[in-house]
Amino acid sequence: MIVCDLRHATRRGYAGVSGNQVANERSALVLARAHAIVNQVYVVSVNASGPHGLGQSLVVDPEGLVRQQAGGNDEVIVDVLDLDAVTRVHRYGTLGLNRMWDQMDAHGPNLSLPMYGGSYRPRPFRP
């Protein structure tokens, strides 16, 4: 569905990502919501409509709320993304529960990330 490393994109300051849904629309909805929650970003999933695609393009906020969802036919959906919501979720966590970046910062440079050939670099100090 999403073909980039969302966690890396989020750390670089991206507030939203886009991608294509998988072949099953129910699975795609679950995956889009999960990606938004885990990575604390907006997910905008843009898809082809029928007869060659499933449609069901959608916008999901950083806490997994589906803000807009198209049907299976040609349709334009519009949403205004509140980028402050991304900052709020990063600071206080999804539903105020998980502060992923604080948890990673707590491990500091000792957190090994072999996938990237290095280690985690904590964020600059923010008062």
Image (cartoon, rainbow, N blue to C red):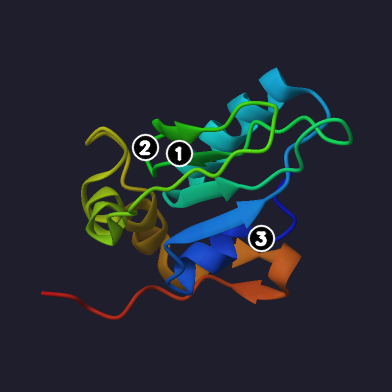
Q: Amino acid at mark 1?
A: Ile
Q: Earlier in the sequence, mark 1 or mark 3?
A: 3
Q: Relative to 42, is 80 on the left or the right?
A: left
Are dots 2 and 1 in contact, CB under 8 Å? yes
Residue 37: assigned label? 1
Name the element at disc 3.
loop
Pick out the residue farthest to the right: 52
Question: For mark 3, does the 10 Å Cα neighbourhood hold few (<14), some (14 to 19), or many (20 or more) residues?
Answer: few
Q: Nearer the viewer, mark 3 or mark 2?
A: 2
Label annotation for residue 60: none
Using residue 44 as the reference point, say whether residue 102 is left or right of it. left
Q: Residue furthest top?
A: 26
The residue at 55%/44% (across/down) is 76
Residue sitting at 72 percent across and 23 percent down? 25
Q: Quadrant of residue 117?
A: bottom right
Residue identifier under label 2? 63
Which residue appears farthest toward the left when viewing the image? 127
Under mark 3, the amino acid is Asp
Which of the two residues, 64 or 109, is positioned nearer the viewer here?
A: 64
123 lies above or below 36:
below
Q: Which residue, given by chain and number where applicable, does mark 3 sit on?
A: 5
Residue farthest bottom in this picture:
124
* Image point (10%, 74%), residue name: 127
Separation of residues labelled 1 and 3 (CA atoms):
14 Å
